[in-house]
Image (tube, helix red, strand yellow):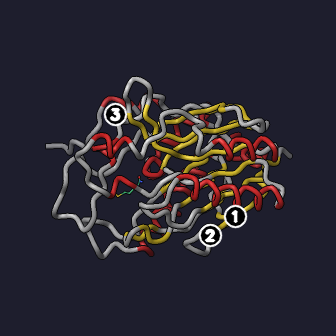
Amino acid sequence: MRVINVAAAQMGPIQRADGREVVVKRMLALMDEAKAKGADLIVYPELALTTFFPRWYMEDQAEVDSWFEREMPDAAVRPLFDRARQHQMAMSFGYAELTPDGHHYNTAILTDRNSNIVGKYRKVHLPGHEEYDPTRSHQHLEKRYFEPGDLGFPVWRNLGGIVGMAVCNDRRWPETYRVMGLQGVEMVVLGYNTPSVNSQKNVEGPEQRLFHNRLSVQSGAYQNSCWVIAVAKAGVEDGHPLIGGSLIVNPDGEIVAEAKTEGDELLVAPCDLDATRFGKETIFDFARHRRIEHYGLITSRTGAIPPE
Ligand code: CDT
């Protein structure tokens, strides 16, 4: 057995006025609880340090940039790195990254037990739109504020396993998991901020959104025989509700832990990486069963083109 005790640290809402220091204190409390429960790895949500700011339409670039981190760790986040090292706990969390040469990404990092950053991932599948859209019940301006990630879907050796990352909307795309699956991924960690209602279809409410969350994460885990840890930022942020439903899913696609609240809530489960082997050596033995000669359209065509 190669067990990683994983803590999925769901976070309740972060209001627009909440400073990073306040948020980091909440993250530290979750980390201490994770340590008390024997966690080796703690996973926090997408954009864990701030409110989900892409719901706000902004024209002033200085205001936009105030939501981004220019270095990692910066002063506000350093206590998290220090505590994680003290606890000998690896961690992953999402934040808005502004690079020294002016690029903006929706990023997640992975650290080892000594708080060294061993992995960085930049969100590839950016949902939403670029301009203010008055037809929507709320805005989702990720395409305005971020560039698509430029790092692909790497995986890293950490904690004796092979770990990959994704961010929110990426979890809905089978390509995300498969590219990591082809590198032998054993655990995918991801965070999300998912509005409880579809801004373009108000009958799609929280129940259906939670269903789609489970469907995406469970199928990604099963089809690639890996663990998936999916962690929400949840609850009502300045009047805008986000779903909870954080999940720890095993390589059979089964849910082993699921959040019950929309607040700060810790799920801890022992994840045996050797449990990925059966699926990887049988029904999803890619080397034996994949037929890449038939998959060309996946990388040569972006949108669907139906026959005449
Ligand atoms: N943060 C994020 O990627 N949220 C999206 C909302 C999709 S609706 C524009 C998600 O896939 O959950």
- Closer to the observer: label 2 or label 3? 2
Q: Which residue is mark 1?
A: 267
Q: CA distance from mark 2 to mark 3?
A: 38 Å
Q: Secondary structure at mark 2?
A: loop
- Is the residue marked by circle 3 packed among few (<14), some (14-19), or many (20+) residues within 10 Å? few
- Residue 59: horizontal and vertical position, in percent? 22, 46
Q: Which of the image's four quarters has the C terminus?
A: top left
- Residue at 34 percent of width and 72 percent of height: 204
Tell me: 248 left or right of 123. Answer: right
Q: Quadrant of residue 136?
A: bottom left
Q: Which residue is mark 2?
A: 259
Q: CA distance from mark 1 to mark 2?
A: 7 Å
Quick check: is the Cβ at mark 3 less than 8 Å away from ligand 1? no
Q: Secondary structure at mark 1?
A: strand
- Is the residue marked by circle 1 packed among few (<14), some (14-19), or many (20+) residues within 10 Å? many
Q: Secondary structure at mark 3?
A: helix
- Residue at 25 percent of width and 44 percent of height: 60
Q: Are marks 1 and 2 in contact (CB under 8 Å)?
A: yes
Tell me: 137 left or right of 165. Answer: left
- Residue 5: horizontal and vertical position, in percent? 78, 53
- In the image, residue 272 above or below residue 196: above
Instruction: Give the amino acid at mark 3.
Output: Leu
- Closer to the observer: label 3 or label 1? 1
- Going from N to C along the chain, the mark reached first, 3 or 1, is 1
Instruction: Give the amino acid at mark 1.
Output: Leu
Q: Which residue is mark 3?
A: 297
Question: Where in the image, quadrant-wise, is ligand 1 located?
Answer: bottom left
